[in-house]
Amino acid sequence: MPALSSTMTEGKIVSWVKSEGDKLSKGESVVVVESDKADMDVKTFYDGYLAAIMVEEGGVAAVGSAIALLAKTEDEIAQATSKAKEQSSSLSSSAAPSCLLQ
């Protein structure tokens, strides 16, 4: 979750503009995030693929935590999806917070 203002500590996912598996180009909007001040489009800094969404619409994540995994190639999507599922299941089996930290 990027910091969209100097006072932002967490953000809420309003909507995903892209879906898992979609190809991304640097500068494209990927997700709309509600900060403490406004709703803002978040753009990708990289070319690649949206491999796994880790925080669904309506979910809240701390600034600095992972909200999605990106893959450089289509071949890496399955690997990233597997990693996201492993992290998700390890959190749900413990008393961990609801957001995944990188």
Image (cartoon, grey):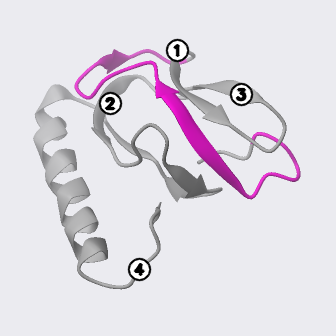
At x 17%, y 39%, the residue is 76
Q: Residue 53 location in percent, x, y?
A: 34, 41
- Residue 86 x/y as whole percent: 19, 65
- In the rendering, which numbered label is found on residue 28? 1
Q: What element carries label 3?
A: strand
- The circle drawn on residue 96 is 4
- Tag 3 near tag 2, CB within 8 Å: no
Q: Where is residue 26 in the image (x, y as percent from the top left)?
A: 51, 18
Q: Label 2 belongs to which residue?
A: 50
Tell whether 21 sits left or right of 60: left
Which residue shows up at 31% across the image and 23% down it?
A: 19
- Which residue is pictured at 32% across the width and 30% down the height? 50
**Local secondary structure at mark 1:** loop
Magenta includes 27?
no
Instruction: Specify whether residue 101 is in view.
Output: no
Which numbered dot is residue 39? 3
Q: How crowded is mark 4: few (under 14 residues within 10 Å), some or many (20 or more)?
A: few
In the rendered image, the vertical position of residue 52 relative to residue 88, given as above or below? above
Front residue (pair 37, 85): 37
